[in-house]
Image (cartoon, helix red, strand yellow):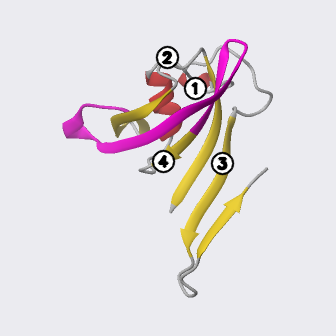
Amino acid sequence: MEKTYWALVEGQMTPRSGMCVDWIGLDDGRPEIVDRREGKEARLEYRTLRLVGRQSLLEIRLETGRKHQIRLQLARRRHPVVGDRRYGSRRDFGPGIALHAQQVAFVHPVRGERLVLRAP
């Protein structure tokens, strides 16, 4: 399963592309970045698509799929997803947050062909 997201984050992401590797565990049932021994590895790759004022539009490819992974890892690097008050955003984004599941790709379990589903 390949998952690609678009996220508008606060600030100008530096470097403009890279890999985020952290460990995520639960604290009182809430996901958070923890010490390596206490959590599960969380890996994502990102690249900046463009700068939008003082914000960065990122394309993110998940290598793992932990709960709140993108939100946690970007906030940890001082680039919270716009509108994500839970993880430190100071900007509004209507009733939601600026995170969009843009594409999912997988191999069909019966036909064996690769399927790609995109959301505009």
Name the residue nearer the viewer: 108 or 72: 108
- Specify the amino acid type for callout 2: Arg
Name the residue nearer the viewer: 5 or 96: 5
**Structural distance between the alpha carbons of marks 1 and 2:** 13 Å
Earlier-in-chain disc, 4 versus 2: 4
Tag nearer the camera, 4 or 2: 4
Give the main secondary structure of the magenta stretch.
Answer: strand
Give the magenta part as a residue range: 32-59
> Please, what secondary structure does the residue beneath circle 4 have?
strand
Tag nearer the camera, 1 or 2: 2
**Structural distance between the alpha carbons of marks 4 and 1:** 21 Å
Residue 59 percent location from the top left of the image: 60, 38
> Please, what secondary structure does the residue beneath circle 2 have?
loop
> Please, what secondary structure does the residue beneath circle 3 have?
strand
Q: Residue 62 carries which label?
A: 4
For the point 45% across and 51% down, the residue is 65
Circle 2 sits on which residue? 78
**Structural distance between the alpha carbons of marks 4 and 3:** 11 Å
**Structural distance between the alpha carbons of marks 3 and 2:** 21 Å
Residue 71 percent location from the top left of the image: 53, 33
Task: Classify 10 Å Cα crowding around label 1: few (below 14), some (14-19), many (20 and above).
Answer: few
For the point 67% across and 24% down, the residue is 82
**Structural distance between the alpha carbons of marks 4 and 2:** 19 Å
Circle 1 sits on which residue? 86
For the point 42% across and 50% down, the residue is 63
Earlier-in-chain disc, 1 versus 3: 1
Earlier-in-chain disc, 4 versus 3: 4
Q: In this view, does 37 lie above or below 81?
A: below
For the point 55% across and 68% down, the residue is 106
**Horizontal relation, residue 41 to residue 5: left or right:** left
- Quarter-wise, where is residue 81 in the image? top right
Circle 3 sits on which residue? 101
